[in-house]
Amino acid sequence: MGIETAVQHAIKPALVKTSGLSKKYSQGSPFSRKKFAVDALVDVNFEIASGCLTALVGESGSGKSTLAACLAMLEKPDAGEVWFGGEEISGRSDRELAPLRPKIQMVFQDSAEALNPRFSAAEIIEEPLAIQRCRTTKQLRTRACELMEEVGLSADWADRRPLQFSGGQRQRLAIARAIALKPSFVILDESLSGLDLSTQAQILNLLLDLQTAHGLTYLLISHDFSLVGQVADFVAVMHKGRIVEYGARQPLIGNPQHDQTRRLLDSVRVMDRSFQAAQGGRQQ
Amino acid sequence: MHAQSGAAPWVDSPLLRVRGLTARYVCADQTEPALAEVDFDIARGEIVGILGESGSGKSTLALSILGLLPTNARIEGSILFQNQAHKPEDLLRLDEPQWREIRGAEISMIFQEPRLSLSPVMRVGEQIAEVMRAHGDGTPKKQDVEAILRRVRLADSGRVSSAYPYQLSGGELHRIAIAQALACGPDLVIADEPTRSLDVTVQGEILNVLREVNRESGSALIFITHNPALLVGFADRVMVMYAGRIVEEGPVAQVFRRPLHPYTKALLQLVPQRSEPSDPVQQRLPVISGSLSDSDRPAGGCAFEPRCPARTNFCRSELPSTIKLEGGRRVSCFNYGN
Amino acid sequence: MKYLQRRLAHSIVLLISASVFCFLLSDLAPGSFFDEMKLNPQISPGTVAALRSEYGLDQALPVRYGLWVKSVLRGEWGYSFAYNFPVRSLLIIRARNTLLLTSLAMLLAWLTALPLGVWIASRPGRWDDRLSMAGTSLLLAVPELVLALGLLYVVIRTRALPAGGMVSVRFEGLSLWAKICDLSAHLVVPLTVLVLASLPILVRHVRASMTEVLQAPFIQAACGHGIGQARLLFRYALPAAANPLISLLGLSVAGLMSGSLLVEVITGWPGLGPLLLEASMSRDLYVVVGVVMASTVFMILGSLLADVMLVIFDPRVRAD
């Protein structure tokens, strides 16, 4: 990937933009007077380029999930704005937001918790379609089976419950549910954590295929930089509620500006290099 | 307990000797195999890595060493353990009271995901004290608990000891899980994916703690993981498991430099290594096609055969025997090295 | 402290609303205390009217309510027409009797249900589990009324225990020890009925809550550290299972004044139950209001207790 692609990325329109986003949570016992406020997000400004994969990395507690919730309109920020497709969405009411919701979808980390254990696989995929009143019951089922095949699950398993699937298969199911409404923006919040190396690679490949096929924009959130760094076009580094560095992958990895980014890259490189040394040189 | 030098006979015999371990789960009318003919030894003080995906049987192996398998599990074989009275015991023949003496005191486990494996309604210091009380006399003093927390390099042991799990960070909780496992000085510690949800900087710290603790206490460590990169510079030996069998074993450096089993080779290629600026963005990642759960196990043959790039005609119908090689290496493949 | 202040304010509002509601409903009910007298041809309508006005029954509702509130503040809590006495003295004696019965029942029921539920939860699927599930189902299905009558029948037939009332006729003349024995003998029947009626729900809740907690990973981890069975159940599992049980405890406390009405009436226990029944039938308005308010106070106390206990015992609640 050279300069031309970086320039191409630079001129791609931003699908999602945030400006001055802030959110606090307060904690404390109902009996005590003290309540301490936790700054989950502090003045977050960044953009997500359309059609690209943006990785959001940071340690746990850095605010990544809160940012995801604000972008997905699941939470309202205390201050700042979120724009989607050129329209400001953070100030809107729920009714005004309703038509936009199919366009922004989310895949969570723990599929066992995110999928209703009493629904069958087909019902899980049909639910968002039914809520949006897309089709008749028969069409729902057909569409659900199509989606299952598209994510690599056999349509024969349409009546199985989520807990009968393996972890990787459950994530595929969650992805099928997310793309059912033909979104333009998919947020993946630690969706690959907790999976084995081989399953992670397979799911990432699936995501890349879906991105090409449907023109999706991804925000891939992870604490594992070495995983997401392989496929990201852009990388944003979060630390204590702020985005401390953001840019195209190559320049960021080659020339990190912030301490936090450097720390992250150093730890990853130490592991990579010792692994490569153990293998007796780089494997291509 | 530290290994003593001299002519004491028990020092040279392995701490743990597993032979022919076979396990299956029985539910309703179905039987699911979990482990098949597992044989290995663990010497005192060594760090052994067990590498495998989910479904490889690594968790079943860990649980069977501690006798924590559910009631629908059927186990055969033998697990000989040199207990602290220096007598070999077959762990599969123990009853509950005998198990209670061994668990936590002579063999202990660092469970996955400490947020789930610690009680949410008890202070962390009390939970460590409970383990000590279960195996010692009387209630341990606050200083004893704090001393253990310092051993795992937890700063501010006073505050941490009186905190509840929800008040602590992921890194702190992982250290507490290690502290709990070490509280009574066991000879063998089993760590089941102890760094799973941690980011890479904290992961390195936890591995350091484990390494130091292993050096200081002389207890052996079985480190279970799915990521080969964690074992480099950490484990002495590695055992690669697939579908309930050990398919390759040997010193870490040698196995990684020259993997013999096709599965080990494929697994090593999956490790992400693209952190240099010259590495391009991947359009497609290397994978091992298929998966462990939905491949139909060929009856009588090698379980990896459906996904193996080096398979031959008879791999489907015949089980490869274990071939011992020099340098303490073993491999179970007809086509190893190719 | 802000939390407690808020709850106190809520409680006062609740009490006032309950009293207004009760007043309204009692007024809506047809008839008044002196209706029976009206039927008596020997008493002239004039006398009835005079009595009514004397007791303030001809005043408008808000005025009567105001008078009642004044009476409460004076410490009399209204006036009983039937007994010709301030409600307070009546209420206190009867409430004391009821509390004696119900608090003993609550104590016994909980002290039995907790260990029983914990024990059963630790042995799922075994014979004692099945036996207890069958037993609790049976007890749940049998109405309190039938239990009480059945027990009374047995007691009367066998003459083993007194068949009703709180104390014997010759109570006053007995020594202290004999007094205690006499009271206890009279307690047996109503106490047994109350305990048997509330036991199944408690046992099932304890069992359900414990069963869920026993599946949690931290229990397996503690087992893996060699923690013994008893400690595992009571020190690890039960505190984690306590949340729904604390709410249940709050409900038990809330029902201390009102839960025993039927049993008291059937066994002749001189508590609030018979008093309320009598007063309702004869339209002794202020007694009815007084008893209802006493019940309400306990309901509020019970729910407040449950909330406070939750915060004290569950550190996770404090984090919210």
Image: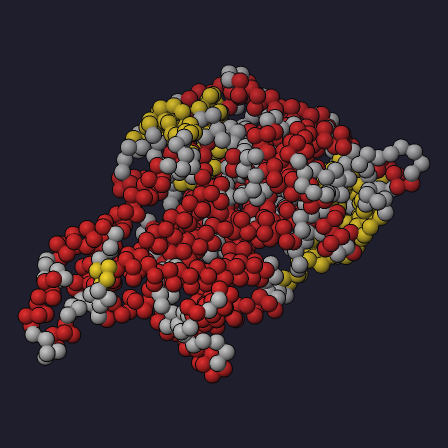
Picture quarter containing residue C251? bottom left
The quadrant of the image that shows the C terminus of chain B is top right
Picture quarter containing residue B159? top right
Could you tell whether C163 is left or right of B137 in the image? left
The quadrant of the image that shows the N terminus of chain B is top right
Depth check: give the residue in front, C135 or A275: C135
Could you tell whether C92 is left or right of B322 in the image? left
Can residue B324 be seen here? The reply is no
User: Percent position (x, y) of residue B177?
Assistant: 63, 38
Q: Residue placed at 23% from the left, 50% from the top?
A: C74
Can residue A91 be seen here? The reply is yes
Depth check: give the residue in front, B296 or C130: C130
Compared with A264, B121 (above or below) is below
User: Percent position (x, y) of residue B29?
Assistant: 63, 66
User: Percent position (x, y) of residue A6?
Assistant: 47, 21
Number of labels in the image equals: 0
Could you tell whether C122 is left or right of A126 in the image? right
Compared with B304, C55 (above or below) is below
Picture quarter containing residue B192? top right
Q: Residue placed at 65% from the left, 53% from the top?
A: C229
Q: Residue placed at 88% from the left, 41% from the top?
A: B10
User: Percent position (x, y) of residue C283?
Assistant: 20, 67
